[in-house]
Image: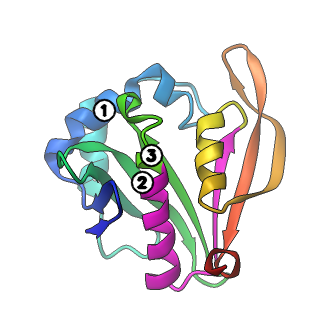
Amino acid sequence: MYKGEKVKLRAYKKEDLKSCVEFINDPEVKQNLTPGIPFPFKYEDELKWYDSLNPMSEKSYSFAIETLEEEMYIGGLGINSVDWKNSVAVVGIFLGKDYFNLGYGTDAMKIIIKFIFEQMNINKIKLFVYSFNKRAIRTYEKTGFRVEGVLRQEIFRNGEYHDEIIMGLLREDWKK
């Protein structure tokens, strides 16, 4: 468990899965998560994912995001892949819609950044975000990420093509 000012990152619990499915299937949340067809997830899908979690993995790590005050599950944050040779980790985050714009995402990102640089000895963190997800882009910029590239018209959403933005944060920039 890792604490920030508003949230803590902890291991997932089976009782989180009902809320997780509800959050992920919300159209406003879902459109920002995956490039594929935004088809709803079933509880059984999340249960399979939960059963596949391995705390001893060296490839990916999933954290539940919980509020400090209410101790309520509000979303998830993952280290989706780790390239140990080149010292690069890829992260992703989602929150339930009711928890947008309250500083929870920024706090969770600060926690995971510190964890990755100080505990995993990684040199660079990167992430991918769709150009229409302005709220997430602001969060990433507030936590030190910079745009490193743009994949033009990479995703088709709501009848239009949109760019996918690649953002990165180096340990040396974070230390400053």
Q: Which residue is mark 1?
A: 21
- Whether residues under marks 2 and 3 lie with C-beta atoms below 8 angstroms apart, the answer is no
- Based on the displayed image, in which of its 4 quarters is residue 133 positioned? top right
Span highlighted in magenta in the image: 106-130
Residue 41 at x, y percent in the picture = 37, 29
Q: Please rate how many residues cluster around mark 2, counting C-alpha atoms within 10 Å: few if below 14, some from 14 to 19, many from 20.
A: many
Task: Please check the rendered image and state whether residue 87 is part of the magenta-colored stretch, yes or no.
Answer: no
Question: Which numbered mark, 1 or 2, is in the foreground of this view?
Answer: 2
Distance from Cα at disc 3 to Cα at disc 1: 22 Å
Q: Which disc number belongs to residue 103?
A: 3
| Image-quadrant location for residue 98 | top left
Instruction: State the separation of the CA atoms marked 2 and 3.
Output: 15 Å
Rounded to the nearest whole Å, what is the CA distance between mark 1 and mark 2? 15 Å
Q: Which residue position holds label 2? A: 77
Q: Position of residue 72 (x, y in %)?
A: 20, 44
Image position, residue 78 (x, y; %): 44, 57
